[in-house]
Image: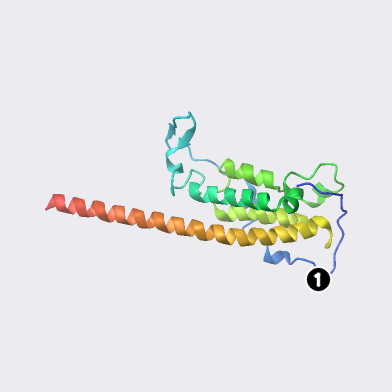
Amino acid sequence: MTTTAPVRKKTRTSSASKVDLNLIIPSCQRRSCTTTRSRSTSTPEKTSRRGRKKTAAAGGGAPHASGMPEFERNEYRRLVQHMVRMNKELAAPFMKPVPKWVPGYYEVITIPVDISMILNRLDSWFYASRADFEADMRQMFVNAYTFNQPGSLEYEYALELHSIFNTMMSTALDKVLQHLAEEYEKEVRSTTSSGRKRKRRST
């Protein structure tokens, strides 16, 4: 995340532009949302035609070793990429980490998050669940609300991009839930069919 100009944090009183952070901070603990997950090594690996290794559990709706299905991970990655592509000006301040030379930023912001970090974490299967992904996205916006003054460019950009993200996330979640429901139905039909075949053989 980059800023157009360093802004000194001030203690703010009630304001029409002030955001109620209780409405946007996720219920999960920050520490649990941002610590690195251990990866399971029991999943067998196979090499694709192009030489890339992938786990047997990473295809279709099956969960990766991290716990998140590949379809779901890909949907969230598309969401972030599309949000950035369609809102380049709004997203620009949040694309990379805030420079170290910005006065006081890293004293005030103890959990820095930016879009490049989120995309890298999606690529590396860092997130074990939707809640983990959403926690990082919302932390990025909370950081902007905390460090910048209401009415500043970065603050207003964060408000608008946050609203866009919430709308896009709702749509993405609908797709994910629909896909998971379809995968579940396929599994039930397959299990039922296998049970019938075994029953016929036993009679």
- Residue in the image at 67% along x and 44% along y: 117
Please provide percent x and percent y for residue 32. Answer: 61, 51
Residue 25 appears in the rendering: no
Residue at 81% x, 52% y is 108
Looking at the image, the residue that sits furthest to the top is 51
Which residue is painted at 29% across and 53% down in the image?
191
Q: Secondary structure at mark 1?
A: loop
Q: Quadrant of residue 121?
A: top right
* Render colour scheme: rainbow
Q: In the rendered image, which residue does mark 1 sit on?
A: 16
Three-letter amino acid code of the residue under disc 1: Ala
Q: Is residue 165 visible?
A: yes
Along the line of sight, which residue is nearer the eye, 23 or 83? 83
Report the residue that reaches farthest toward the left.
203
Q: Which residue occupies the foreground of this view, 48 or 118? A: 48
Q: How many marks?
A: 1
Residue 166 sits in which quadrant?
bottom right
Q: Residues within 10 Å of mark 1 (few under 14, many from 20)?
A: few
Q: Residue at x 85, y 49 (%)?
A: 104
Q: Nearer the viewer, residue 189 or 139?
A: 189
Q: Is residue 47 left or right of residue 37?
A: left
x then y, percent, for residue 164: 66, 60
* Vertical order, 100 against 48 (above or below): below
Q: Is residue 152 above or below residue 85?
A: below
> Please, is residue 71 above or below residue 27 in the view?
above
Q: Position of residue 138 (x, y in %)?
A: 67, 56
List x then y, in percent, for residue 188: 33, 56
